Every structure is written in C-alpha cells, then in structure tokens.
C-alpha cells in the first residue's frame, strides 16, 4: 500500500497540469512502515528527455542524487517515482516496465486535456515480469 498525504497528492496533480501535454516526473520521499510506504513529500523534477516529451520522461543521475541528498537531510528515503500519462490511462506502459526497478512504488497520473484524472501506483515484481497495482490511501 502507498499512503500519500494530501499535500503530496495535490502537488503531483498540479505538476501534471503545469507540464501538460508533456510528461512530468518526480520522486516520492518518505518511510516504509510494515507493508506500507508512507509518502511525506514529493520532489518535482524537470523532464530531462530531449525528444518525445509527451510520451517519455528522463531522470538524470544528478537529479536523482539531489533527491537522495534531500531525503538524507530529512531523515527519510526515496520510496519511488511518479510521472504523468498525458491523454493516456494511468497504467504502466511496456517502456515503464523495461525501465523500472523492484522495491519502489511508481505512481502514474493520467491527464486528459490538461485535467488530472486517475492516479494509480504500481510495484514491479522481483523477477521484473510485470507490475502489481498498489492501493493508494490519502492521509492528512
């Protein structure tokens, strides 16, 4: 299960709206507690992809390092990533499957005509064969 506080949920929605029709991307920061990942904050990243930004995003090693340093300063950890699917469902693509790693949550938000719609979360199986959908729970 992925627990997102209302502030983080809203920041993801606003980021997706602001970058439409391009994909947005960012990092989920928080702590694991039992079977749940508790997101305390999100770090918006710039989509560093040079081409096809409407269908692909790229996180650079430098951006990842900065997010990791922020997590360390706050005493939390990277729990995963989020990105938008402009005018497409909030489900992982084959490209997402090929570039994901196990042990993280992958939040996808669909954005239709600039309006955020469904938000889902996915976890890659350890054999990297497929994603399993995670329940998202909002909290204050």
Image: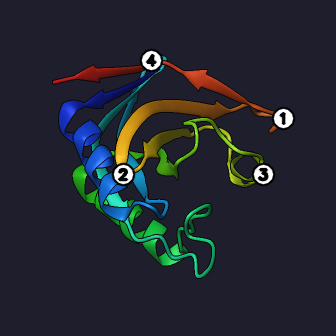
Q: Is residue 28 visible?
A: yes
Q: CA distance from mark 2 to mark 1?
A: 32 Å
Give the image quarter of residue 88. top right
According to the picture, the residue beneath numbered tag 2 turns out to be 114
Residue that badge 1 annotates: 129
Dot 4 or dot 2, earlier in sequence:
4
Q: Using residue 3 as the reference point, say whether residue 8 is left or right of it.
A: left
Question: Label 3, label 4: how many angstroms apart (C-alpha)?
Answer: 28 Å
The CA span between labels 4 and 2 is: 36 Å
Q: Residue at x 43, y 45 (%)?
A: 111
Name of the residue lying farthest toward the front: 113
Q: Which residue is mark 4?
A: 34
Q: Looking at the picture, how far across and down is residue 104, in whole percent? A: 56, 40
Q: Residues within 10 Å of mark 3 (few under 14, many from 20)?
A: few
Q: Residues within 10 Å of mark 2 (few under 14, many from 20)?
A: some
Q: Which residue has dot 3 on it?
A: 98
Residue at image coords 25%, 41%: 8
């Amino acid at each position: 299960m992925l627990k997102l506080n209302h502030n983080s949920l809203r920041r993801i929605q606003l980021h997706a709206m602001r970058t439409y029709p391009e994909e947005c991307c960012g990092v989920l920061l928080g702590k694991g507690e039992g079977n749940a990942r508790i997101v305390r904050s999100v770090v918006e990243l710039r989509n560093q992809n040079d081409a096809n930004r409407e269908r692909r995003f790229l996180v650079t090693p430098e951006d990842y390092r900065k997010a990791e340093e922020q997590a360390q300063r706050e005493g939390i950890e990277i729990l995963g990533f989020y990105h938008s699917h402009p005018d497409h469902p909030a489900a992982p693509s084959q490209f997402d499957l090929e570039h994901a790693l196990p042990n993280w949550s992958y939040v996808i938000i669909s954005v239709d005509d600039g309006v955020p719609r469904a938000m889902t979360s996915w976890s890659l199986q350890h054999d990297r064969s497929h994603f399993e959908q995670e329940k998202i729970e909002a909290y204050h």
